[in-house]
Image (cartoon, rainbow, N blue to C red):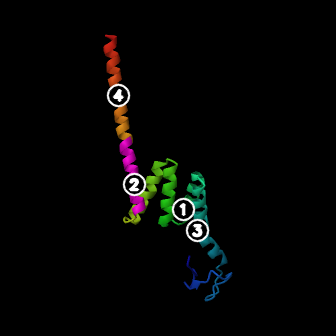
């Protein structure tokens, strides 16, 4: 991760324990720590997902997206965690946001396609159940006569 001083835009050397910018003297230690916190949260989310704790993963990715709304990778991870938790609405919302920002993103496009297929399957199943119920009701009425 490359970091620049928020005042003079001078690149900061993260290999050194910085307190102040080497160029303008601005205090940058807290700024550097805060800037790296989203990466730490993202990695915690990945670890939680690998362990199967999708709720914790979702929460970590949601925090990253809250702080960095244009982070496509974190938003995709959030959408996938929501998908695993069967929160179709939030998964759809995040993949739609990505498509608005970056229409060429393949992962969000595939996620939206899967959600659309799932929605169609659910609608077809509901239609089938309704038809079956109507058919059973007709049979019962015929038997009563």
User: Which of pointers 3 and 4 lies earlier in the amino acid sequence?
Assistant: 3
Which of the two residues, 103 or 20, is positioned nearer the viewer here?
A: 103
Instruction: Classify residue 94 as left or right of residue 130.
Output: right
Residue under numbered circle 1: 66
Residue under numbered circle 4: 132
User: Which of pointers 1 and 4 lies earlier in the amino acid sequence?
Assistant: 1
Where is residue 56? Give x, y as percent: 60, 54
Mark 1 → mark 3, Cα distance in angstroms: 13 Å
Mark 2 → mark 4, Cα distance in angstroms: 30 Å
Q: What element carries label 2?
A: helix
Which of the two residues, 8 or 102, is positioned nearer the viewer here?
A: 102
- Res 69 seen here: no
Mark 1 → mark 2, Cα distance in angstroms: 21 Å
Q: How crowded is mark 2: few (under 14 residues within 10 Å), some or many (20 or more)?
A: many
Mark 3 → mark 2, Cα distance in angstroms: 26 Å
Residue under numbered circle 2: 112
Mark 1 and 4 residues: CB-CB less than 8 Å, in contact? no
């Amino acid at each position: 991760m490359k970091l620049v001083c928020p005042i003079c835009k001078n690149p900061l050397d993260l290999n050194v324990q910085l307190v102040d910018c080497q160029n303008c003297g601005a205090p940058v230690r807290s700024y550097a720590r805060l800037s790296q916190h989203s990466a730490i949260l993202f990695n915690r989310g990945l670890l939680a997902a690998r362990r199967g704790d999708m709720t914790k993963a979702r929460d970590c990715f949601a925090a990253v997206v809250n702080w960095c709304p244009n982070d496509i990778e974190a938003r995709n991870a959030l959408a996938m965690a929501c998908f695993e938790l069967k929160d179709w609405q939030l998964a759809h919302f995040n993949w739609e946001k990505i498509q608005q920002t970056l229409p060429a993103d393949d992962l969000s496009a595939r996620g939206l396609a899967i959600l659309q297929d799932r929605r169609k399957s659910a609608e077809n199943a509901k239609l089938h159940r309704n038809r079956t119920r109507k058919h059973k009701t007709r049979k019962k009425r015929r038997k009563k006569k």
